[in-house]
Structure formats: structure tokens, C-alpha cells
Amino acid sequence: MCASVKYGSRGPALIPRMKTKHRIYYITLFSVVLLGLIATGMFQFWPHSIESSAEWSLDRRSVHDAPLVRIPMSSPIPERGDLSCRMHTCFDVYRCGYNPKNKIKVYIYPLQRFVDEVGVPISSTGLSREYNDLLSAISDSDFYTDDVTRACLFIPSTDVLNQNSLRIRETAQALAMLPRWDKGMNHLLFNMLPGGPPDYNTALDVPRDRALLAGGGFSTWTYRQGYDVSIPVYSPLSAEVDLPERQPGPRRYFILSSQTAIHREYRVELERLKEENGEALLLLDKCSNLSQGLASVRKRCYKGQVYDYPQILQESSFCVVLRGARLGQATLSDVLQAGCVPVIMADSYILPFSEVLDWKRASVVIPEEKLPEMYTILKSIPHRQVEEMQRQARWFWEAYFSSMKAIGMTTLQIINDRIYPYAARTYEEWNNPSVVKWSSVNSPLFLPLIPPRSPGFTAVVLTYDRIESLFRVITEISKVPSLAKLLVVWNNQNKSPPEESLWPKVTVPLKVVRTKENKLSNRFFPFDEIETEAVLAIDDDIIMLTSDELQFGYEVWREFPDRLVGYPGRLHLWDHEMGKWKYESEWTNEVSMVLTGAAFYHKYFNYLYTYKMPGDIKNWVDAHMNCEDIAMNFLVANITGKAPIKVTPRKKFKCPECTAIDGLSLDQTHMVERSECINKFASVFGTMPLKVVEHRADPVLYKDDFPEKLKSFPNIGSL
Amino acid sequence: MQARKKYVLLGLCTCCWLLLYYWGGLQERLLGLLTHRRGEVVRPWPNWLDRDLLPGYADQAELQNAGGPGDSPRQRRQSWAGIYKDSRCRMDTCFDFARCQGQSSFRVYIYPPEKGERVSESYRKILTSVVESRYFTSDPREACLFVLGIDTLDRDQLSTQFVPNMDERIRGYPLWNDGRNHVIFNLYSGTWPNYTEDLGFNVGQAILAKASLNTEHFRPGFDISIPLFSKEHPQKGGERGWLVRNTVPPRRKYLLMFKGKRYLTGIGSDTRNALHHIHNGKDIVSLTTCRHGKDWEKHKDARCDHDNQEYERFDYQELLHNSTFCLVPRGRRLGSFRFLESLQAACIPVLLSNGWELPFSDVIQWNQAVIEGDERLLLQVPSTVRAVGTDRVLALRQRTQMLWEAYFSSVDKIVLTTLEIIKDRVNSHISRNKFMWNALPGGLLVLPEYSTHLAHYPFYYLNLGKPVQKPTRRHLNQFGVHAVIVCVLVWVSCQIIILWNSEKPPPHRSKWPPMPVPLIITDGRRKTSSRFLPNAAIETEAVLSLDEDTVLLTSEINFAFHVWQSFPERIVGYPPRSHFWDPVKKAWGYTSKWTNEYSIVLTGAAFYHRYYHHLFSHYLPSSLRALVDRTSNCEDILMNFLVSSVTHLPPIKVAQRKQYKEMPILQGTKMAPWANPEHFTQRQECVNTFASWFGYMPLVHSQFRLDPVLFKDHVSVLRKRYKDLERV
């Protein structure tokens, strides 16, 4: 800097003595140097205040640039992990706070290279590729925060995945030197290979105070249930080898053992099984003739025959995962990837993510002692179940084992679920593959209840201006014994409803609601006025239903509160010529929909219709002024997986005013429109949820040779 | 000269700049500037330049080697047994699996009570449950599990039911064996002031089935946490949950409620003393009283008088009925009666009991039924419960009812669940998965010996999700049909199983033989109940059960099968019957008259899932089956009881036919057994016997039957698929 100043100040004196071409040359040179220096200075001093103070946050640096930290000999060592630690005793929940998203905030310490007093690093490998992947994934996720004061969980950047590469005492000291260590509170360590020779402890031997441990290979004695997280041992083969998913089904071999380090006692047992059952078993071992190194890792041998590993795993229905000196095995990950059902024999092993994953659906866990019975046990499993386990095993791998990212995210989600248990993921979310999630049904009204008759139902009459017919409907319905309330939805904005004195006198409360817009959706709005569970949606021209018919409909609804219960039924059909769905109102032997011109249903479906209708179906219905009933049928069938119930022989609603218009042509355009609706809705739902049935509900004594006066519902009406 | 100076200076400058460039971090800054536009967020964890050069965390060969073969498994097992005992017990080390091998592997033995032994009401119920369970044995040699005859429920030294000298007495048991394979039931342990978990005697290697277990003392996979229940808790059956309808919106009058004691001192007082803070008198009612214990007035503080007044204003039962959430804070001990009370009341429990190992936590997914709060975060509870959405409240509430009815409503269920959990551990490869435990109808009604595959049960079809069917094809005969035809003659009974998987219905009886389908004849051993024996020959899910004299048209069978496919968990059939309560006799009545409702569909002509065969033969006690065999009667009623107790729903009657047998033809002495008048009174008695075994009346009435869509309509006969049905 000073040089440039000096030089610059003398510059003008020099210039005149030079030749012109030299002068230009020098001026250019000076300005370049000057600019360079100024720029340097700017970068050197100014930007510090803008960018975050931590230098490591910069992209594209070498790991070796991380600051070096020297650990003094006398630096404190944390206590050994406390086995009685639980979330409510060793975890500071106040740091996580209450937040509407119910997401914990995770902070990652900047990378530092720890060395002891003489400069020897604490770890022989330093940051490993896997740990780097893990931390990158976390820092890219929603969990990450760079604000250390707002963090709920802290993750040290010191890599402890493999205990064998660590110097235990120094690593512990390094952890204790972290600025927010505070007895390890809310710190999370990831470790996949705990313990070392000769006793191979099942949890990381590094003293770590109260830090949570996400460990691979926990035994039931070291695992602190509800505190630690059991994680898989990541297999780097996952990234190297691409095993395409195979259709579940029987494979060439029934049982395969691919592990190289099986204790002699077990190998003898396996050999015996092989003798008894022959070709169904394949026992592989290391290849003795191959040179050491990468090649030997990817090969297995049986009597001189060489097999590719892990590809060979795909050739077997079951794959043995026996414990070695360590409980956690990378083999488990390979086996799952191959879609082979693991047969896990490792007593006291805490299976990966066992807090949330249901391993019984993806594996067979057999006590080590029962190894001789393995074949019989596996043979007793039904074929269909084996197939499902194969599918489940592969899916577990994809979702939870396939990458360090998957492992890290699952671990954080599990901890998140503990801190915000009321927003925790459900069993189904954890354990059902997406295909199943998509096609399976978890009905919101799943409890089998037959609600009592007493509260009755609320009739919701949608009307525009047909007052005369409306009044007749009201008078008719009011005769139904279980009617609790009448709600008239006045859909005409240009006209006021008639005065109160003009309405027919009814014994139940009658309430008129005026709507803001003339929309068909208004009939399915969850009005506060509806106080009963059961809703009868009825048009203002449905005068033909008898009171017995309606009461019977209500009784049937009580036995099927999660379904639509209606009178005329309709059907959807697949039109082979056109290659699309067709609406059918012919009197067929089957039913998949009921008209909501008069239908009972649960008020809950009003909420669903109004607030949770997928896609633009609601707007579509309002724009076309049609098909609201089809939409409702789709919605209910989709969420419950059940067909509607058609009651009584009623086939159509006669509409007295319709006769005036040319019935036939109206009918045809109507049918085309309705068919269009079905196709539209099926594409929005992504599937055809409607279910076809061949039955309808009639009173027990319908058309029986029995005195009419003794029947509960003698006047059940006709077509 | 000048020129050289210039060059030197220039060189110096360049050097300075280069130095700065390489050492001063300029390089990265410039690179950063080039690669990142300004204002963009910097990646929090750097994308290291040399990330591809980073070493793997472990050598691949090392990973596959897994630390080598390790110690000898045999030696390890031996040394484990020495190390991991008492407080570190696990099934692997403290349980003798060898005792549980063999055909009927899981048997439970109860030590006979000693003379003059006083056993509390609750413990007597527990023992009764074990004795009446299908696992009971009176022979200690074949037992896998042992239950003490001494009452260990109340280990509070101040309690009147406290049994002294436990250690000595237990040592007197010849089979005690340091508690191996024993299970010890306990509800209360410890006493004032610290209520420790200690039972006051050496439990050794026995499994603890204990209420209010602390996670710290809980031996995972070994002990079992049971709920605290009162001595009024029914032996059998039990009250149903209080939820009768799913109102929407699901909010009740109060959002959150608590009514109970406030501890001013001692253990548990931290939480109980703070509960009044969240009381707002409107939607959150949290009432506490100081009035408990002998000398409460001594510790009385400023709040007490006012609190006590407020306390009296609300009725606990009324609050239970009208509150969406119920606080379940710890008392002196971790668990409380409140937990079961609110479960039953469908008032979603909000737990404030840190460290409580929830009842049957091994198998029940509690986060789907309760809100697990944290004592430390009491003041957040109101905002937390307010934030729970409508759908979730609806789901949580139904789940409370499901769990209550499946596992908690009676002592029987609590004890059986405990036994089943242990049994699942013993036969780990034939056990229920979490799904079975947590889905309707609950784990007790799912027998894993039948199958461990979900699709083999009638309950899960909807949850499992079927592969999406192509719209072009409809599977008409997904399950195929099985018919079990039982011929009941006067002295000899035979059973014919006809198997056919074609879509074609079975030929009429007169056309036998030749049969287009295999015909299997098995020996019924003259037992009526053998009709429902699980028969390996039955390979399809649907079973059509017919009597020897049943007359059914093929289209009737077809139609019934179609209906059954929509209701695979129910009985779908023809002959309806009904039960009723006779207030004069104070007993249940049975009627075969035509009525407007029915609750039984006789299995003389009905479809049901083959799993019910298994339940009938293995779930029901042998005493009921013996009754059926003795009287040669009632097996169909018992089946209806069973199915309705599983589904809580009525059976389904299809179409019009009510009479399913040929009219009795008097042929001298031979008379069909059902035409006997004694037959009918027997059935009356059966209904009452069954109801008393179940502890309640599981049968439910239905008012409709299912007919074909065009049944008896004025439409052309050609259009109707089931036109034959109308001729019946």
C-alpha cells in the first residue's frame, strides 16, 4: 500500500520524460496495479462487516482450510453418557420453544480441525465423505438455522461416525470445547461404528455428557429408549451399485447367507441347514483366491464359484443378517436394497429407527438360539406375506437407508416428533409405502358407531324461487318423526323469501338462510345452524317421498353414518369405444352413486366439500350449475373407500315442471354433461374412487306377506 | 536507473498483490463473487472443493467384516445371563424360553392361595381373568409363565392390603427360581413422601406388570406398564365408551378441563401446584382443591379458600362429558385413575406426567390417541390444544374409544393384553405387528397363529389399499367361495367341505355326484362345534355355511356373496333372528318370529370370513364350545355373538327368504332337531349364557335388509340379474 502511494505521488514527475508509447504502457500498468490493490483492500477489510462473520460459510473451500484448534492437555473431559437420560431429564426443551410449524431448529458448528498439544489430529480421517453428506443435507433442510441462539439442537462438525478412527480422550475434550456444549445438552452425535476390539461396545465410547446419540448397533442395554436414536449402518455400496427394484415374488434361492464374518458355530449350523434343504440355501463366503482390495468386497464365493455382491442378494427371498462382533451391520442395508427379506438374528439388537418403523412387516427377527429352526420358521410364512415383506424391505431402504441424507432426515424427524408429539407423524405415514398411502383409505369416521335416533336429522332444502313446491316439500318432510330442524337455503339474491306468516306451520324449528351468490355449493355449506350429525339434503321439488321412506332412510343412515344414503341410484360405466367414463341413469342392476336431490349424510362431509375438495371441482360445479351430487359421491367414496347405500325401490325424482320442455333432448344434453363431470372428477382425483355394488336397502319385512300395520315402514313408496 | 527503479517498484507492487491474493483470502472472495451473485443466500454448510476427495467413514472391507465373527455365541449367552439380571433384565437373559416350547406352548400357572390368605378385590379379578383365559393350566410342569397367589397389587406400606414378609414367602415357592418366568402385578408402590418404585421385596428376574412405571426403571422389552384401575373396574365386558356420535365441529363446551387435588408439598407438587394458572373460567377449567389428607389446613395457603369454593361449583362427571381435552397430570405417582376415565369419556387426555411409561407402550401407538404434554411446558398447553385441528380431534377422539374398548374396559382385557404381549415376545416370529395392535378391532381379537399376514384378516381390506383396478375389468370373484355343508343326523354327523374356485355356483344337491369340484369329507366327530373348526382345506376367504336341509337358489348364493364382498367382516346371510330384553324375567329372550328388526343371521345359510372359524375355535373358551356340543345347538348364535363382539355391528340379512329349510315332513320318529320345542328353550338359555360370558350383550339390531337393486320393481324381468330371487 505504502509503495503504491509513494509511487503514485512521484508519478507525474516521471511521466513527461518518457516516450509516448512507454507512457501509455506504464499508465495502463499502474492503473491495473492500483485497481488491484484497491480491490484487495476492499475485500480485505470492508466485506467482513457484510457477510456473516464466519469465514467457513463461504462456498467452495477446501476442508483443509478449516481453522486449526489446539486442545490443551488439561482441557476438561465430559462425563460418560448417563444411562438414565431421557428427554424430560437431559434435554432442554425450552430452547425449542413453541412454534406454529412444529419444527425444531438445528445448528451445525463450523468445521474445525482439532489437534492435540503436539499437533497430532484427533481423528485419523478427519471429516469423512458420509458425514459431510449428512451435514450438507441437514443444512439444506428446513431444520437448519444459522442462528445459534435460536437453535434447539446442535450438531458438532467433528466426525464420530467411526470410532476406530478416533482418539477417544481427545475427541471428548474437543466436544467439551464447543462453545455451546453446556454438558452436552441438546447436542446430537452421529455414530455408525461404535466400540472397538476386543469387546466392541455397542455405543460410542467417547464420553459425551448428556448428548443424544444417533448410533448404529445399539444393544438394548446401551440404548436409552425415547432418548437415543438407533440408526442404520450406512453401506457405501448403496451409492456405488444400482440395483433396480425387482418385482416381489419367489426367487431362485430361498435363503441366502452372504456375510463374510460369521462365527464358526453359526456357520456349522448353516451348513447343516444347507445339507438338509439343499439347493434352497446358498451359503457364500469370502473368495480366498482373489486378491485383497475393492474386488474382494464385491465378490462372494461358494465352492470355487464366484458370485457378484450385492447383485446376488436379489436372487433370494430371504437373506440372513447374523450378528458379528458388532450388532449393526452394513449388510442389512444391502439386503434391503436388493428387496430381499432380512432374517435378523442378533439378540438384544435395537433395529434401526425401531421407534417408528414396524420391522415385523419388513423382516423376520429370530432369536440366535433358534437358528436351527430358521428354515421351518421361514417356510411357514405365507407367500403373499413374503411378497409384501419384499416390497416393504425395498421401500424401507429407499425411504430411510438409501443415503446419508435419508438417515439424517429420519433421525431429525424422530427427534422432532418427540418434541412436538401432538404433530407427530402417524404409524401409517412412517410405514406405508407411498403406493399404499395413495390407494389405501383412512376414513375420518372409522369408529363403528350406530348413533342414537334421538337427535334426529336436519333437512337442508335448497330453493330458488319455487315457493309453492317448496312449501309442499316442507309440509311433507315435517311429518317425518325424526326431523329435528328445517333449514331453507334461499339461493335467490333478487328476491326475498316470503314473510314468516306465509310459511307452513311446522312443529320443528324452521330457519331460512340467505346466500350471497346463487351457487350450487351452498347446499353443502357446513352451516352452524345444522346441529345434528345427520343432514338430509333435499331439493325443493322432491314431494314424492313418503314420510316412511324418509324415516327409513334415516334409520339406514344411522347404521352407515360414514356413507351417503340416498334414493335414486346412478352408475358410472367405462365406455370402451370412447375410452372414457360414461354416466348411466338407466335402471341397472348396479349402483355407484346416489342423487343428493334427497340424501342423508354426515355433516362432516359438508366441511370436506367446502374446504377440502381437491382441485377446482368446486368452482367447476358452480360454473356449470350441475354435478354437485356427483362431486359429493366422489368425495365420500374417495375418503371412505365405500359405496353409497341406495334405499327403497325409488328410481327417479319426478319433476312436474320438467314435462313442459322437450324431455328427450334435455335428457341427452344432460347425460353428456354428467358424463363429462365424471371424467373431469376422475382426472382431478387421479383415480376412480366410486365403488359399484348390486344391493339396495329395504325394510326387513318389505313386500313380505305380513300384516301391513305391524310393519315399521309400511308405506315405502314406489319407483 | 530510473527505468530499473520503476521495474522494481512495479515488481514489488505485483508481489504485494499476489501475496494478498493468495494469503488474504482474496481468491475465495473473488471466486465467490464469480460463482454467486450478490444477495443470494450463502450455503450454510460449505460445498467443499475437495468433497469428492474426502475419505469414506470406514473401509468397505471393514464394514462387511463387521468387526469379525466375535466371541463364541454360546459363551456370550452364558456370560450375559450372569451380567444382565435384576434391573438389567431382558427377555434374552432373564426368561427361560425352554419352558414355553411344545404344542401348547404358552401356559400360565397360578400358585394356589394359602389358607387364610386375604386377596384384594382387584387381585381376585386378575386371578379370575387368568384362570378363565385360554392359557391357564393347573399343572406347574407345563407352565411357561407363573402368577403369584399372593396379592402384590398394593405395596404401599401404609395400606391395609400390604402383605408383609414377601421375601420370605416367595423364597418358599419351590418354582420361584429367582423370579424367572414369573409375572408380578402391581398397582401401587412406595409410600409417602417419595413414592419410590420399589416394591419392598426382591423382584429378581420376574416380569413386572406395574402401573405408573417410570421410564428410568422400566426394563424395555421386559416389564409391562399397565394402567391404574379402580377396584370397581368390571371383571368382564365393561362399559362401552361414551362416544355415541361424531359431532362436527368436534368441539365441546369446554376446551380443556381438570378437577383434582392440589399438592402444596411433596412429590408431584411442582405440577399440581401450578395447574390453576391455566384456569380461565371460560373454556379452560382447571380446578384444584387443597382439601385432602388429614392435616391439609396446616399447609393451607392464600389460594386455598377461594379455590375450594370454585372447586365445588363444577361437577367432575359433567366436565368429563363436556370437555374436548382432559388434563391428566401426575399425582403422587405417575399414573392416575383419570387416565382411564378420560379415555372412556372420549375426552382426549393431555398428559402431564414426565417419565411415565404409558400403558402397554410396547404395542400401542399412544400419540394417535393422546396429547403428550411436558410438565415443564404447562403454560403452553392451552395454545397447543387450541392448535389441534378439527380432523385430528375427530381422529384422536375415536382412537380413545377404540383403545378403551380393545384393551382397557375390563380387568379381563387388561390381563389378557399383558399375557398376549408376553406371548408375542415368546413366539416372536408368530406375533402381531404394530398395525394389528393399533387398528380395529384391536390385538386381542387378532390371533397370529392363524396368520401373520394382514390380508388374511377380514378387517384391513380398506386400510391396506388394493392395487388400483383397471376400469375395463371388474373382479367378480376375488375370493372364490367355499361351502361347508354340515349334515346333522340324529346320531352321526358328517361334514362335507366342497371347494370350488370357479365363478360358477355349486350345483344343486340333487345333482351330486358327479361334481365338477373337489369334494372333501372330514369327520365332524359328532360335535356341533366342529362345524366351525378351522379347516386347512379352506383356502378362500369366504365361507358359505349351509345346513344339510338348507334350500337355497344359486342366484341367492351369488347375490349373498356379492354383498359379503362389501362387508367381509360381517355375517351375510338369509335366516334372521332377534334377541330382546325381557323385563319381566329380567333375562334375554330369543325369537324366531318375523319382526321389523333382527340381530342374528343363522349360519345355516350365510357367508362369513374364514378367520371366524379360527376365532370360534381358539378365542372362545372351551366351556362355551362344550355347551354347544352338549346340546347340539346354539353354535350359530354363538357365532353371531362372536362376530358382533368383534365388529360392534349387526349382521346383514339379504333378500327376502326367511325360511331356509324344507318344511318339516313327519316321517314317523325322525324329526329335525330344530323342530323340537326343547330346542327353542335351549336357545333362550344359550343367549343368556353367552351374554354372561361376554359380560355384555354384543348383539346389535338392524332394521334393513339388502335386496338386489331391481328387486320386485315393475321393470322387465329380462333386465334383472337376480330375477330368481323374486320367486322365493
Image: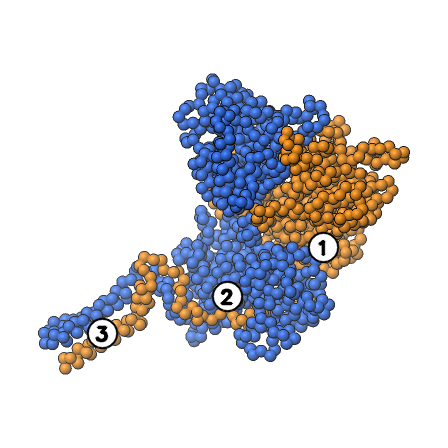
Chain colours: A blue, B orange
Q: Are marks 1 and 3 on the same chain?
A: yes
**Residue A577 — which label?**
none
Q: Determine the residue positioned at 70% across, 58% down.
A: A380
The residue sitting at the left extreme is A16
Closer to viewer: mark 1 or mark 2: 2
SS for callout 3? helix
Expressed as whole percent of the image width and height from the top left, the position of residue A609 reads 49, 38
SS for callout 1? strand
Expressed as whole percent of the image width and height from the top left, the position of residue A391 reads 59, 57
B587 w.r.t. A411: above or below:
above
SS for callout 2? helix
> For residue B329, what is the image quadrant?
top right
Q: Determine the residue positioned at 65% across, 35% down.
A: B718
Mark positioned earlier in the residue sequence (1 or 3)? 3
Q: Looking at the image, how many numbered discs can be counted on the residues?
A: 3
Residue type for callout 2: Ala
**Residue A239 — which label?**
2
Q: Determine the residue positioned at 75% across, 27% down.
A: B584
B375 w.r.t. B63: above or below:
above
Closer to viewer: mark 1 or mark 3: 3
Q: Are marks 2 and 3 on the same chain?
A: no
Residue identifier under label 3: B13
Residue type for callout 1: His
**Residue B182 — which label?**
1
Q: Determine the residue positioned at 25% across, 72% down.
A: B17
The residue sitting at the right extreme is B668
